[in-house]
């Protein structure tokens, strides 16, 4: 059975969890992290799940980060590469219509999420949730909010052109931005209205796979 090391509070692990739910592949989740544990972030004095600093883990993933998978002896790290591997190996039709150009387009939105949506969202998570209250910085939070909104405007435009991020069909390119938009909405910060994103959000969050691991607010708001 496929093994996944990670934690459900990690956005990058969430991308893999959602993808696994889409393809309905049985797997074992092994909780691992150097910074988060069952009670929350180490900056609040909590104990992390650990494992990532062990020799065995470092032999699989020298970065000591999550997620990592082992699929019948094939070990892979880097969340986006894991999602692309799972899509290609298990569900090319479902996750990119078995079309190389749609694959590339979805791959682009996956990398865009990592490069553009994730950095401001990481700052929001830290300054809203994970840092102890006296270490939170309202200015950094506000800067991150505005930066995130700029990126949402790019998604809004795209979703005015296509029903989903890449085409008229759901693809793995909807998973990563979908996860970030879900988190953003749970934060409940002030935002302009984005009607195309609202329409798309309704569609992606009504997917049964979204509700397996990603919907739960505690995976996004606790820590
Ligand atoms: N580029 C890597 C980054 C991995 C990464 O930084 N993961 C975070 C969680 S989202 C992590 O390992 N944080 C430290 C920890 O939990 O120990 C990927 O996309 O997989």
Image (cartoon, grey):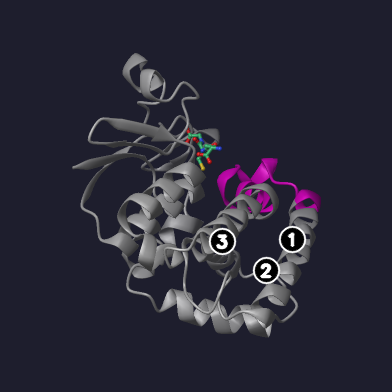
- Is residue 10 depicted above or below 97 in this figure? above
Main secondary structure type of the part rendered in magenta:
helix
Q: Are marks 3 and 1 in contact (CB under 8 Å)?
A: no
- In the rendering, at what x and y percent does residue 60 appear? 37, 24
Residue situated furthest left in the rendering? 1
Q: Are marks 2 and 1 in contact (CB under 8 Å)?
A: yes
Of residue 192 and residue 43, the one placed in the foreground of this image is 192
Quadrant that contains the N terminus: top left
Determine if the magenta segment contains residue 11: no
User: Under tag 2, what secondary structure?
Assistant: loop
Q: Are marks 3 and 2 in contact (CB under 8 Å)?
A: no
Q: Which sits earlier in the primary sequence, circle 3 or circle 1?
A: 3
Question: To which quarter of the image does residue 216 belong?
Answer: bottom left
Q: Which residues are magenta?
A: 119-140
Which of the numbered marks, if any, corresponds to residue 145?
1
Which of the numbered marks, if any, corresponds to residue 101?
3
Which of the numbered marks, if any, corresponds to residue 189?
2
């Amino acid at each position: 059975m496929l093994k996944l090391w990670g934690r459900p509070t990690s956005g990058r692990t969430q991308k893999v969890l959602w993808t696994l739910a889409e393809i309905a592949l049985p797997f074992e989740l092994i909780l691992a992290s150097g910074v988060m544990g069952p009670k929350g972030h180490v900056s609040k004095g909590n104990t992390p799940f650990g494992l990532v600093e062990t020799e065995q883990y470092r032999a699989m993933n020298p970065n000591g980060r999550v997620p990592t998978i082992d699929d019948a002896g094939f070990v892979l790290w880097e969340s986006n590469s894991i999602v692309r591997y799972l899509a290609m190996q298990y569900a090319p039709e479902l996750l990119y219509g078995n079309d190389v150009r749609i694959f590339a387009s979805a791959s682009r939105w996956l990398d865009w999420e990592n490069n553009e949506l994730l950095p401001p969202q990481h700052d929001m998570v830290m300054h809203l949730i994970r840092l102890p209250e006296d270490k939170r910085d309202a200015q950094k939070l506000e800067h991150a909010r505005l930066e995130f909104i700029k990126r949402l405007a790019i998604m809004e435009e795209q979703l005015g052109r296509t029903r989903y991020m890449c085409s008229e069909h759901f693809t793995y390119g909807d998973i990563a931005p979908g996860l970030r938009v879900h988190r953003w909405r749970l934060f409940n910060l002030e935002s302009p209205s984005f009607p195309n994103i609202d329409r798309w959000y309704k569609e992606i969050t009504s997917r049964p796979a979204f509700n397996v691991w990603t919907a739960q607010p505690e995976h996004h708001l606790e820590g």
